[in-house]
Amino acid sequence: MTTEIETNRKSLYETDYLRWIETTLAQLQMRDYSNIDWENLIEEIGDMGRSERRSLKSNLIVIITHLLKWQYQPNFRSGSWKGSIVEHRRRIRESLKESPSL
C-alpha cells in the first residue's frame, strides 16, 4: 500500500527534479530519514557512478581515435586534432584525480 507521503515524494521527483534534490538534501542534513525518497535517491547515486564511468570511456574513445588518426593519417593532421588530444588528456587526468577508483 502506497502512502500519501510516498506518492508526493515520487511525484516531486518526476515533476520538479531540482526541488526533489533540494528537499532530499535538506532531509539528509536534518537527519529526517523517515521522509527521504530512498528508492530514487539510491537510483540517483548509482547513476552518478555510471555517469562518471561513461564520461571517462567517452574521453578515452575520443583521445584514442585522434591519436590513431595522428599516427596513421599524417597528411591530415590538424590543430583541432592536437587540441582535442590535449583537452581529452586533461579531462581524463581530472577525472582520475577526482575519482582514482575509475
Image (tube, grey):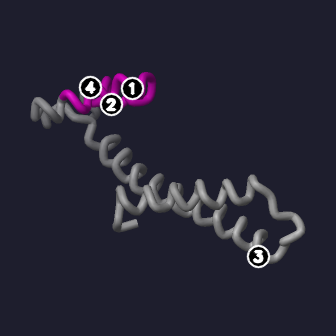
What is the CA distance from the residue labelled 3 to the residue labelled 2? 46 Å
Q: Quadrant of residue 16?
A: top left
Q: Quadrant of residue 102?
A: bottom left
SS at circle 2: helix
Q: Which residue is mark 1?
A: 18
Bounds of the magenta span? 6-26
In the depicted structure, whether residue 73 falls above or below residue 16 = below
Q: Nearer the viewer, mark 1 or mark 3?
A: 3
Label 3 crowd bin: few (<14), some (14–19), many (20+), radius 10 Å = few
Q: Which residue is mark 3?
A: 71
Amino acid type shown at disc 1: Leu
Compared across the picture, whether 73 is left or right of 30 comes to right
Q: Nearer the viewer, residue 55 or 31?
A: 55
SS at circle 1: helix
What is the CA distance from the residue labelled 1 to the residue labelled 2? 5 Å
First reached walking from the N terminus: tag 1 or tag 3: 1
Classified by dominant secondary structure, the portion drawn in magenta counts as helix
- Residue occupying the point 33% across, 30% down: 21
Residues tagged 1 and 2 counted as in contact (Cβ below 8 A): yes
Residues tagged 4 and 2 counted as in contact (Cβ below 8 A): yes
